[in-house]
Image (tube, rainbow, N blue to C red):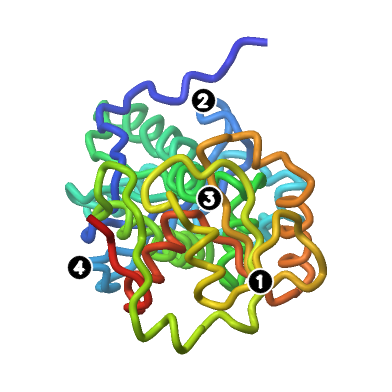
Amino acid sequence: MSSIKRDRYIDGKLLVGYPDDYTVLDIETTGLNPQNDYITEISAIKYCNNRRVDEFSSLVKPDFSIPYYITRLTGIDDAMVADAPSIDEVILCFMDFLADDIIAGYNVGFDLSFIAENLAGYYAKRLANDYVDVMKLAQNELPFLGRYKQTAVAEYFNIATAGAHRALVDCNICNGCYQKLKELAVADYHLPPQQRELVLAHSASSLKPLADKQIVLLGSFDSLYVKNVWEILTALGASVAQHVTASADMVIVGTADASVCDGADLQLAISMKSAGRNIYILKEDVFCQSLLAKGWLRVGG
């Protein structure tokens, strides 16, 4: 079976980063092939300086009946789109709304392929907007998660997913994930390039702020501020372990060795969190940056 070429008619570039001004896009369709299937809904939310400033949403009447399994997934049926505008009208309104904004979306190549196909087919225009794929950001920031559907990432961040698979709801879920991932990534931009020792702040050594916590260290700690993490955690009063048990409060994941993502301990921690257990799972650099931000540590010479 030949693969579907997703990037035809798309001139914009995939960006690796976290812009503050962007438009979140999501569509619903009758299938997976932008050359043979149809858009049934387009929604978008515009953000300036990370603040919501406008939104666009429209159902679209496709050229044939919506398959039953699509209706079961999205809730969109033939009756709902009977009086909706056709895609040639909606795509123009959407492009006017979008202007030259950066597009953000979850597995956004899928959405872009349908937009570009219709833009080219009806108006002989190519899609020139640059774009950010929030799924790729999640894979970068949460390498230990294992599952990268939008709902799985949202559940990891405790973002509500009720009403998913309707375009405007999915835009809101996507932006929630984007902002949470951005919070994790900000620390990365300010960390020094080479490994340094962490030094315990005098006040923290007497307070022992982690005295009631069991912290599990998983993976290889070969980067950033991880030279003496075990020693520091012990000095802060934590009970440090190398395996996840029911009493674990926090799991710190050293991602220098990617095999940690498939390890039984990390999978157990993820399943505990999914079941509602109050357990934190953090990358090594995010965790260490949080200790620095609290003033419990400083960077040594």
Residue drawn at 26 percent across, 56 percent down: 22
Comparing 133 with 167, the one in front is: 133
Q: Dot 2 surroundings within 10 Å: few (below 14), some, or many (20 or more)?
A: some
Comparing 214 with 115, the one in front is: 214
232, above or below 253, in the image: below
Comparing 71 with 213, the one in front is: 213
Q: Quadrant of the N terminus?
A: top right
Residue 131, image x, y percentages: 31, 42
Q: Quadrant of residue 32?
A: top right
Q: How far apart are labels 3 and 2 at the CA level?
A: 33 Å
Q: Nearer the viewer, mark 3 or mark 4?
A: 3
CB contact under 8 Å: marks 1 and 2: no
Q: Dot 3 surroundings within 10 Å: few (below 14), some, or many (20 or more)?
A: many
Query: What amino acid is found at the position of numbered circle 2 in the picture?
Result: Gln
Q: Is mark 4 on a helix, strand or loop?
A: loop
Residue labelled with disc 1 = 239
**Which residue occupies the extreme top position in the image?**
2
Q: How far apart are labels 1 and 4 at the CA level?
A: 41 Å
Residue drawn at 33 percent across, 68 percent down: 55
Residue labelled with disc 2 = 35
